[in-house]
Image: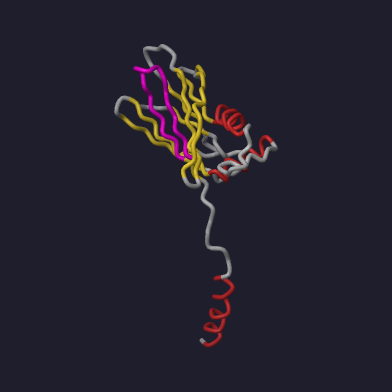
Amino acid sequence: MKTWILFFLTLFPVISLQPLDHKFYLSVTQMEFDADKNRITAISRVFVDDLEETLRQRYDVQLALGTDREDEKASFYISRYVEQKLTVEINNEPLNFSFAGFTYQNDQIVLLSEFSLIESDEYEIKVTNALITDAYSEQQNLVHFRMNQKKQSEVLTKERSFFVVVL
């Protein structure tokens, strides 16, 4: 018994020296289907450091996002990246993407995007959100899609980056 107590007493300090914080990779995107305005709006919240590292790996740029040293080309790279990773198709037809801008809230960057609707009597909507998954395979992208007062929520990953809206 004394051996076990001694073992745990020596093990506890070693375990307590290990870092306790585990990085969690998550984004949240809210999408709204607005037939009256002929668009789908998207508001994505991503951790600034995750996006910055992803852009660094993808485009080999140091943007210093959210600092007073932020690169003047930050909007260009962010827009280009989001356009490639956040897409919407209706009836297998990709919608036109428009990047409306971004803002910072604490340690997150809020990305504003719009997709122009196409005329149709029926809508089969496919949403793809692969933000940050190229840099962090653990990334999870929670998407809330609203249409006609109904909501569908999905968790997307590197392995499953899209879903079809069934509202």
Look at the image and give the residue range highlighted in magenta: 28-45
Q: Please tell me in which quadrant of the rendered image residue 90 appears.
A: top left
Expressed as whole percent of the image width and height from the top left, the position of residue 52 reads 60, 41
Q: Residue furthest left?
A: 149
Expressed as whole percent of the image width and height from the top left, the position of residue 134 reads 61, 38
Q: Please tell me in which quadrant of the rendered image residue 35 appears.
A: top left
Q: Residue furthest bottom?
A: 2
Applied colour scheme: secondary structure
In the image, residue 123 sits, relative to residue 77, either above or below, namely: above
Expressed as whole percent of the image width and height from the top left, the position of residue 86 reads 52, 30
Q: Nearer the viewer, residue 43 or 12?
A: 43
Q: Nearer the viewer, residue 125 or 82?
A: 82
The verdict on residue 62 being magenta is no
In the image, residue 154 sits, relative to residue 122, either above or below, namely: below
Answer left or right for 15 relative to 34. right
In the image, residue 92 sits, relative to residue 157, either above or below, namely: above
Q: Please tell me in which quadrant of the rendered image residue 51 appears.
A: top right
Expressed as whole percent of the image width and height from the top left, the position of residue 165 reads 40, 27
* Point 40% across, 18% down: residue: 123
In the image, residue 102 sits, relative to residue 40, either above or below, namely: below
Q: Residue furthest right?
A: 60
* Point 48% across, 21% down: residue: 89
Q: Nearer the viewer, residue 105 or 157?
A: 105
Answer left or right for 64 relative to 97. right
Q: Nearer the viewer, residue 124 or 27?
A: 27
The verdict on residue 39 being magenta is yes
Which quarter of the rendered picture does the C terminus lie within?
top left
Chief SS of the magenta region: strand
* Point 52% across, 26% down: residue: 99
Tally of numbered tags: 0
